[in-house]
Image (tube, helix red, strand yellow):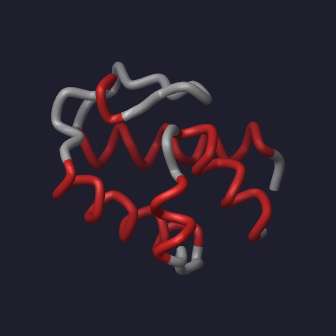
Amino acid sequence: MTREAIFEKLNEIFRDYFDDETICLTDETTADDIEDWDSLEHINLIVTIEKEFGMKFSMGEVTTMKNVGAMADIIADRI
């Protein structure tokens, strides 16, 4: 799966999860950029992403996800 395909899938997940079709993720997108993305929603979002990509992130991976680009990189490394 290409990085572009990963971003397409992440965009779908984020739009569905936050019920906001205007979300357009970039490498630099963080929780500060999406209104409802708080610490509790972050955990639930990670679980949703894990299910969609069929993988389980380690705690170390989750803590290094400072933005969506870092998340995409981890997913790309695991696929």
Question: Horizontal and vertical percent for residue 3?
Answer: 77, 43
Reply above or below: 36 against 13. Answer: above
Question: Horizontal and vertical percent for residue 17?
Answer: 28, 48
Q: Quadrant of residue 37?
A: top left
Q: Which of these two is toward me, 10 or 56?
A: 56
Q: Which of these two is toward me, 14 or 63?
A: 63
Q: Residue at x 38, y 42 (%)?
A: 14
Question: Horizontal and vertical percent for residue 58?
Answer: 53, 78
Q: Is residue 64 left or right of residue 18?
A: right
Q: Residue at x 39, y 63 (%)?
A: 46
Question: Horizontal and vertical percent for residue 74?
Answer: 68, 59
Q: Is residue 18 left or right of residue 78?
A: left
**Figure quadrant of the C terminus:** bottom right
Q: Is residue 17 left or right of residue 1?
A: left
Q: Residue at x 33, y 58 (%)?
A: 45
Q: Residue at x 19, y 27 (%)?
A: 35
Total numbered labels? 0
Reply above or below: 2 against 67. Answer: below
**Figure quadrant of the N terminus:** bottom right
